[in-house]
Image (cartoon, helix red, strand yellow):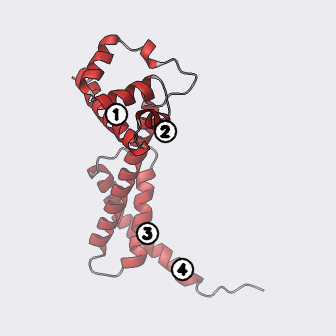
Amino acid sequence: MPTILYGVGKMVTKEIEFNQILEQHKGVIYHLIYKLGVRDDHGDFYQEGLVAFYEAYQKYYGRDSFTRIAYIVVKSRLIDLIRKEKRYSDHCFASQDFHLSHNDVPFQDTLDPYILLQIKQVLTSKQWIYFNKRILEGQPVRVIAAQEQATIDAVKGWGKEVKRKLRKLLKEDYCS
């Protein structure tokens, strides 16, 4: 005996309708990816754009301004993804740049004395303490804070400034 499914025809019709609407508007997703200057090698941004478009379709389809709303929703979602990836990459690179394991050779033995002098001239005394103890010697932040009678947050603040100044210094020296 055949099984009768109620409401399935409506869902299939809605899916077909969505596919037709998507065919009409998928150029918008490609346009936004191009406009935002995104390199989408793996299709992650296109996929995110499709999901955003589908959500906009479910929520706003049938309104006169659907196309405009869908454009805004997709653009916002792509910008959010760009920001998320930037935060992730900034965090990864920052932690890779200044992380020392116990097996590493100390930097002071491998750095050019001229570069160390340049770095010391750019940094304040507290920032130099951070650079010397954290980056060159590999001491934990809490140990530096205890030695310098400062809070852990203060030492982390020194570190942020050190990283900012070193990036600027390296860009000037090696990118010009």
Left-right relation of 13 to 126: right
Q: Residues within 10 Å of mark 1 (few under 14, many from 20)?
A: some
Given the current orientation, which residue lies at the most extreme right position? 1
Amino acid beneath label 3 = Tyr
| Mark sitting earlier along the chain (3/1) | 3
Amino acid beneath label 1 = Lys
Which residue in the protein does label 3 denote? Answer: 54
Left-right relation of 4 to 171: right
Q: What's the CA distance linking mark 1 and mark 4? A: 55 Å
Label 4, secondary structure: give it: helix
Q: Residues within 10 Å of mark 2 (few under 14, many from 20)?
A: some
Please name which of the two marks, 1 or 4, marks the residue nearer to the observer.
Answer: 1
Number of the label disc, if any, that sits on residue 26: none
| Mark sitting earlier along the chain (2/4) | 4
Q: Name the residue nearer the viewer: 125 or 15.
A: 125
Please name which of the two marks, 2 or 4, marks the residue nearer to the observer.
Answer: 2
Q: Residues within 10 Å of mark 3 (few under 14, many from 20)?
A: some
Residue at image point 26% right, 30% down: 168
Q: What's the CA distance linking mark 2 and mark 4? A: 59 Å
Q: What's the CA distance linking mark 3 and mark 2? A: 48 Å
